[in-house]
Image (cartoon, grey):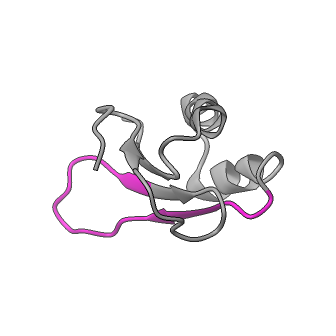
């Protein structure tokens, strides 16, 4: 099962589209971050490490840190 992506900033659709494209390739988190950085050099990806979760969640920061604004979950399309 593909991980859930929580993107920041959530309103950057080109960033979101590129992240979704990479996600479909089934990359490891390390490879995902490396490929994401080909277009977004400051990007960082962190795995949420909560025990008992059925679905992995990756936090994907375009600028290497939280930038404020709306965050969007890629799987559910839910704004948080």
- Using the rendered view, name the quadrant where residue 47 is placed: bottom left
Is most of the magenta stretch helix, strand or loop? loop
Quadrant that contains the N terminus? top left
Q: Is residue 45 rendered to the left or right of residue 35? A: left
Number of callouts in the render?
0
Going 57% across and 71% down the picture, which residue do you hit? 65
Q: Is residue 61 rendered to the left or right of residue 68? A: right
Going 28% across and 37% down the picture, which residue do you hit? 78
Looking at the image, is 52 positioned above or below residue 5?
Answer: below
Looking at the image, is 11 positioned above or below residue 58?
Answer: above
Percent across and percent down for residue 21 are 62, 28
Q: Is residue 55 rendered to the left or right of residue 60? A: left
Going 69% across and 52% down the picture, which residue do you hit? 31
- Which residue is at the front of the view, 58 or 51? 58
In the image, residue 29 lies in the stretch drawn in magenta: no
Percent across and percent down for residue 7 are 48, 50
Q: Is residue 52 rendered to the left or right of residue 78? A: left
Looking at the image, is 70 positioned above or below residue 79?
Answer: below
The single residue placed furthest to the left in the displayed view is 52
- Which residue is at the front of the view, 21 or 56? 21
Going 33% across and 69% down the picture, which residue do you hit? 49
- Using the rendered view, name the quadrant where residue 17 is placed: top right
Percent across and percent down for residue 33 are 67, 55
Q: Which residues are magenta?
A: 41-58
């Amino acid at each position: 099962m593909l991980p859930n992506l929580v993107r920041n900033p959530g309103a950057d659709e080109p960033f979101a589209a590129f992240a979704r494209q990479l996600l479909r390739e089934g990359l490891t988190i390390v490879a995902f971050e490396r490929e994401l950085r080909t277009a977004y050099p400051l990007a960082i990806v962190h795995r949420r490490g909560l025990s008992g979760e059925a679905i992995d969640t990756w936090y994907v920061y375009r600028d290497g840190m939280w930038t404020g604004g709306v965050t969007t979950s890629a799987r559910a399309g839910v704004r948080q």
